[in-house]
Amino acid sequence: MIPFLDLKAINQRFEADFQHGFQGFLDTGYYILGNQVKLFEANFARFCGAKHCIGVGNGLEALRLILEGYKVLGSLEEKDEVLVASNTYIATILAIKQAGLKPVLVEANFDTYNFDFNSLKDSISDKTKAIMPVHLYGQLSPMEEISKFAKENNLLIIEDAAQAHGAKNEKGMRAGNLGDAAGFSFYPSKNLGALGDGGAVTTNNDELAEVIKKLRNYGTATKYVNELLGFNSRLDELQAAFLNIKLPMLNVDNERRRAIAKKYISDISNAKITLPKYDGSEDHVFHLFVVRVENRNKFIDFLDRNGIGHLIHYPIPPHQQEALSEFSHLAFPNTEKIHNEVISIPMSPIMTDEEVDMVIEVLNKY
Ligand SMILES: *Cc1c(COP(=O)(O)O)cnc(C)c1O
């Protein structure tokens, strides 16, 4: 049996350091926004090449706090429209709604699993103020085209980088430094995952960073002096300690993910299975290895019979979710087809060559 993702084994690699880190944490007696959070913020900002990193509670709140921060600064106001891909994970859309803004869903492209550019152009109105590209499955969105489009239309770019820690463009710039601000998640299964919830905002904007630092902690810069109507969304001190231990392995892990993806792409040869489009560069960190098949239930049966783990990212598109019934009248044929056909096969930095070969062998027999 090859598991879809063996998180326990991934984290066992760091066990001795985690225990040491936990003891250090206990010894300080300092539990909220301490030195480990500060250290992680410095480490992760440097890693992304961004000027600021602010540790927050999770990925959803990272995205929401960016939008709330721009509202405080006057760059966004309630009911402004935000362009977002219709095939994203629901968190991106929830962040927009929770900030009182209006998500405008944009049809997806089959090759990039990102915006379809013709639909993007058709989706703009005089209320559109921001665009949220999602680096879905670990692949950078086409940021050059998006930046050009954003510039022409005077839009803020907010990256949803929750699946793309470490992804790098041809100029060596990483996710988190490719727009005006970015939201990251450290949910345990992400490429950089905590042992619980965690998230971060990165930005080069000094004012925005300062506002988000206040917003995450009850709107205060000085204890008990509330300047803003804030939130409670702080990166946990212990999770920051674990993330400081794991961050130095991120590049190595991403490199292993890419090597596995390259092997899958070169050796899986089955007309019934559509592989991801990948140019071999570092712009993809393969958070997930997502293929498409026409008769997915039949394929799932086959994987189950052959002991290959799998998951679907995602089975129901946002506009067809009960919670988002306001969008139920809309049709996104590409997005609907993607949600009907995608399936993720095993991908993790600790898969052995034998396991990778076994997945390939099974898929070629389908
Ligand atoms: C995981 C994820 C989020 C949300 O992160 P949480 O930490 O679970 O809140 C947002 N967007 C995308 C694309 C994600 O994959």
Image (cartoon, helix red, strand yellow):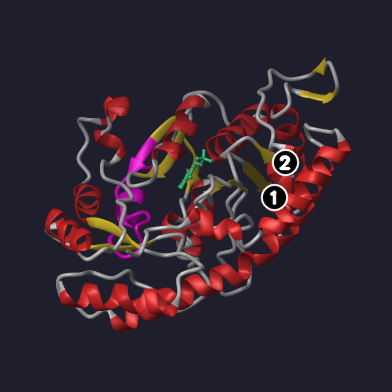
| Kind of residue sitting beneath label 2 | Leu
Q: Which residue is mark 2?
A: 238
State the image coordinates of residue 51 (x, y, percent, origin top left).
Answer: 76, 53
Q: Is residue 58 above or below residue 186?
A: above
**Label 1 amino acid?**
Phe
Q: Position of residue 94 (x, y in %)?
A: 44, 32
Residue 158: give x, y in percent of width and height.
Answer: 55, 46
Query: Residue 253's x, y, as percent?
Result: 57, 68
Q: Is residue 107 magenta?
A: yes
Identified at 70% across, 37% down, the residue is: 236
Specify the label residue 358 is tagged with.
Answer: none
> Bounds of the magenta span?
104-124
Which residue occupies the foreground of this view, 188 or 103? 188
Rendered-image quadrant of the N terminus: bottom left
Is residue 211 found inside the magenta-colored segment of the image?
Answer: no
Which residue position holds label 1? Answer: 242
User: Could you tell me which residue is drawn at 29 percent across and 48 percent down?
Assistant: 107
Q: Quadrant of residue 323?
A: top left
Kindly tell me whether residue 204 is visible in this rendering.
Answer: no
Q: Is residue 31 visible?
A: yes
Rendered position, 76 above or below 365: above
Look at the numbered discs 2 and 1 and tell me whether their residues touch, using CB distance below 8 Å: yes
Foreground pick, 157 / 19:
19
Q: Is residue 213 above or below residue 37?
A: above
Residue at 76% across, 56% down: 43
Q: Answer with the quarter of the image where residue 318 lies.
A: top left
Dot 2: element: helix
